Image: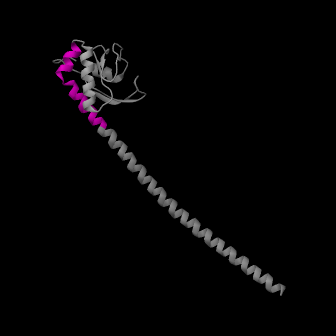
Amino acid sequence: MGTRRTLLGRMILFLTAAIFLFVLTIGAVSYLILSSNLENKAMDDMKSAQKQISDFFSLKERQARTSASLASQNQEISKALLSQESSSLQRMGREFLQNSGLDFITFVDAQGIVAARGHAEGSGDSLQNQKNVLRSLAGESSAGYERSGASKLAYTVTVPLRNGGTV
Protein backbone atom coordinates (compact mmCIF):
# COMPACT_ATOMS: atom_id res chain seq x y z
CA MET A 1 0.00 0.00 0.00
CA GLY A 2 2.93 2.33 0.74
CA THR A 3 4.37 1.78 -2.71
CA ARG A 4 1.03 2.63 -4.33
CA ARG A 5 0.86 5.93 -2.42
CA THR A 6 4.41 6.81 -3.31
CA LEU A 7 3.76 6.00 -6.97
CA LEU A 8 0.46 7.94 -6.91
CA GLY A 9 2.22 10.86 -5.20
CA ARG A 10 4.97 10.87 -7.81
CA MET A 11 2.39 10.78 -10.64
CA ILE A 12 0.48 13.69 -9.13
CA LEU A 13 3.71 15.63 -8.65
CA PHE A 14 4.78 14.85 -12.22
CA LEU A 15 1.37 15.92 -13.64
CA THR A 16 1.39 19.10 -11.54
CA ALA A 17 4.89 19.95 -12.78
CA ALA A 18 3.89 19.19 -16.39
CA ILE A 19 0.79 21.43 -16.12
CA PHE A 20 2.85 24.18 -14.49
CA LEU A 21 5.47 24.01 -17.27
CA PHE A 22 2.73 23.98 -19.94
CA VAL A 23 1.03 27.07 -18.43
CA LEU A 24 4.39 28.80 -18.03
CA THR A 25 5.32 28.07 -21.67
CA ILE A 26 1.94 29.30 -22.98
CA GLY A 27 2.27 32.44 -20.83
CA ALA A 28 5.79 33.17 -22.03
CA VAL A 29 4.89 32.66 -25.70
CA SER A 30 1.78 34.83 -25.29
CA TYR A 31 3.81 37.54 -23.60
CA LEU A 32 6.40 37.54 -26.37
CA ILE A 33 3.77 37.70 -29.10
CA LEU A 34 1.77 40.43 -27.37
CA SER A 35 4.81 42.50 -26.41
CA SER A 36 6.10 42.32 -29.97
CA ASN A 37 2.73 43.46 -31.30
CA LEU A 38 2.51 46.21 -28.69
CA GLU A 39 6.04 47.35 -29.48
CA ASN A 40 5.24 47.49 -33.20
CA LYS A 41 2.04 49.43 -32.46
CA ALA A 42 3.94 51.85 -30.23
CA MET A 43 6.56 52.42 -32.94
CA ASP A 44 3.83 53.04 -35.53
CA ASP A 45 2.09 55.48 -33.18
CA MET A 46 5.38 57.26 -32.51
CA LYS A 47 6.12 57.59 -36.25
CA SER A 48 2.63 58.92 -36.84
CA ALA A 49 2.96 61.49 -34.05
CA GLN A 50 6.38 62.52 -35.35
CA LYS A 51 4.94 63.08 -38.83
CA GLN A 52 2.04 65.12 -37.43
CA ILE A 53 4.44 67.31 -35.46
CA SER A 54 6.69 67.74 -38.48
CA ASP A 55 3.72 68.63 -40.69
CA PHE A 56 2.48 71.12 -38.07
CA PHE A 57 5.84 72.90 -37.91
CA SER A 58 6.13 72.92 -41.72
CA LEU A 59 2.70 74.53 -41.97
CA LYS A 60 3.59 77.13 -39.32
CA GLU A 61 6.85 77.86 -41.12
CA ARG A 62 5.05 78.46 -44.42
CA GLN A 63 2.48 80.67 -42.70
CA ALA A 64 5.20 82.69 -40.97
CA ARG A 65 7.19 83.16 -44.17
CA THR A 66 4.10 84.20 -46.13
CA SER A 67 2.92 86.58 -43.42
CA ALA A 68 6.35 88.17 -43.02
CA SER A 69 6.64 88.63 -46.75
CA LEU A 70 3.24 90.31 -46.88
CA ALA A 71 4.16 92.62 -44.01
CA SER A 72 7.40 93.60 -45.73
CA GLN A 73 5.46 94.64 -48.83
CA ASN A 74 2.98 96.79 -46.88
CA GLN A 75 3.68 100.42 -47.82
CA GLU A 76 1.99 101.78 -44.69
CA ILE A 77 4.35 99.79 -42.51
CA SER A 78 7.36 101.01 -44.52
CA LYS A 79 6.26 104.66 -44.24
CA ALA A 80 5.57 104.37 -40.49
CA LEU A 81 8.97 102.72 -39.91
CA LEU A 82 10.83 105.36 -41.91
CA SER A 83 9.09 108.16 -40.01
CA GLN A 84 9.52 106.33 -36.65
CA GLU A 85 5.76 106.36 -35.90
CA SER A 86 5.87 103.86 -33.05
CA SER A 87 2.17 104.07 -32.18
CA SER A 88 1.14 103.46 -35.81
CA LEU A 89 3.59 100.57 -36.11
CA GLN A 90 2.33 99.03 -32.90
CA ARG A 91 -1.30 99.33 -34.06
CA MET A 92 -0.47 97.81 -37.46
CA GLY A 93 1.53 95.10 -35.72
CA ARG A 94 -1.43 94.16 -33.50
CA GLU A 95 -3.74 94.04 -36.52
CA PHE A 96 -1.19 91.95 -38.37
CA LEU A 97 -0.95 89.46 -35.49
CA GLN A 98 -4.73 89.13 -35.29
CA ASN A 99 -4.98 88.41 -39.01
CA SER A 100 -1.92 86.21 -39.40
CA GLY A 101 -2.21 83.91 -36.39
CA LEU A 102 1.41 84.61 -35.44
CA ASP A 103 2.45 85.40 -31.88
CA PHE A 104 5.13 88.06 -32.27
CA ILE A 105 6.05 90.90 -34.61
CA THR A 106 8.84 93.39 -34.04
CA PHE A 107 9.72 96.32 -36.27
CA VAL A 108 13.42 97.22 -36.26
CA ASP A 109 15.05 100.23 -37.86
CA ALA A 110 18.16 100.16 -40.07
CA GLN A 111 20.44 100.18 -37.00
CA GLY A 112 18.75 97.17 -35.36
CA ILE A 113 16.88 99.26 -32.77
CA VAL A 114 13.29 98.24 -32.00
CA ALA A 115 10.88 100.86 -33.36
CA ALA A 116 7.74 99.00 -32.14
CA ARG A 117 6.32 95.63 -31.23
CA GLY A 118 2.87 94.40 -32.14
CA HIS A 119 2.80 91.84 -29.34
CA ALA A 120 4.00 94.03 -26.45
CA GLU A 121 4.79 97.52 -25.29
CA GLY A 122 8.29 98.82 -25.47
CA SER A 123 10.79 100.00 -28.02
CA GLY A 124 14.29 101.44 -28.19
CA ASP A 125 16.20 98.27 -27.29
CA SER A 126 18.79 96.87 -29.66
CA LEU A 127 18.40 93.52 -31.42
CA GLN A 128 21.70 93.77 -33.29
CA ASN A 129 22.99 90.66 -31.52
CA GLN A 130 20.33 88.42 -33.04
CA LYS A 131 21.49 86.56 -36.14
CA ASN A 132 18.13 86.92 -37.88
CA VAL A 133 18.16 90.70 -37.43
CA LEU A 134 21.73 90.94 -38.73
CA ARG A 135 20.72 89.01 -41.85
CA SER A 136 17.71 91.23 -42.40
CA LEU A 137 19.82 94.37 -41.99
CA ALA A 138 22.11 92.92 -44.66
CA GLY A 139 19.11 92.63 -46.99
CA GLU A 140 18.52 88.89 -46.61
CA SER A 141 15.36 87.09 -45.56
CA SER A 142 15.88 84.33 -43.04
CA ALA A 143 13.98 81.78 -41.00
CA GLY A 144 14.96 79.39 -38.27
CA TYR A 145 14.97 78.59 -34.58
CA GLU A 146 16.75 81.06 -32.39
CA ARG A 147 16.97 82.02 -28.74
CA SER A 148 15.27 85.29 -28.00
CA GLY A 149 14.54 87.43 -24.97
CA ALA A 150 10.76 86.96 -25.00
CA SER A 151 10.91 83.18 -25.19
CA LYS A 152 13.62 80.63 -24.63
CA LEU A 153 13.37 79.33 -28.18
CA ALA A 154 11.45 80.91 -31.03
CA TYR A 155 10.95 80.21 -34.68
CA THR A 156 11.81 83.52 -36.27
CA VAL A 157 11.25 84.82 -39.76
CA THR A 158 12.86 88.10 -40.75
CA VAL A 159 12.27 89.98 -43.94
CA PRO A 160 13.90 93.31 -44.73
CA LEU A 161 11.61 96.23 -45.52
CA ARG A 162 12.77 97.99 -48.63
CA ASN A 163 12.20 101.56 -49.67
CA GLY A 164 13.06 101.51 -53.32
CA GLY A 165 16.27 99.53 -53.34
CA THR A 166 17.33 100.53 -49.81
CA VAL A 167 16.89 98.26 -46.81
Quadrant of the rendered structure where residue 76 is? Answer: top left
Q: Is residue 33 above or below residue 74?
A: below
The spot of residue 100 in percent (x, y) is 26, 32
Image mark count: 0
Quadrant occupied by the C terminus: top left
The spot of residue 82 in percent (x, y) is 21, 13
Along the viewing direction, whichever of 121 and 55 lies nearer the viewer: 121
Give the residue drawn at x 42%, y 52%: 45
Left or right of 153? Residue 79 is left
Give the residue drawn at x 83%, y 87%: 1
The spot of residue 8 in percent (x, y) is 76, 83
Is the magenta region chiefly helix, strand or loop?
helix
The spot of residue 106 in percent (x, y) is 30, 21
Left or right of 22? Residue 163 is left
**Residue extent of the magenta highlight:** 60-82
Q: Is residue 86 magenta?
A: no
Give the residue drawn at x 73%, y 76%: 13
Along the viewing direction, whichever of 163 and 120 lies nearer the viewer: 120
Q: Is residue 139 visible?
A: no
Left or right of 106? Residue 11 is right
Report the coloring of the rendering: one colour
Residue found farthest to the left: 164
Q: Is residue 112 above or below residue 159?
A: above
Quadrant of the rendered structure where residue 69 is? Answer: top left
Q: Is residue 41 visible?
A: yes
Residue found farthest to the bottom: 1
Quadrant of the rendered structure where residue 72 is? Answer: top left
Along the viewing direction, whichever of 59 and 76 lies nearer the viewer: 76
Left or right of 32? Residue 51 is left
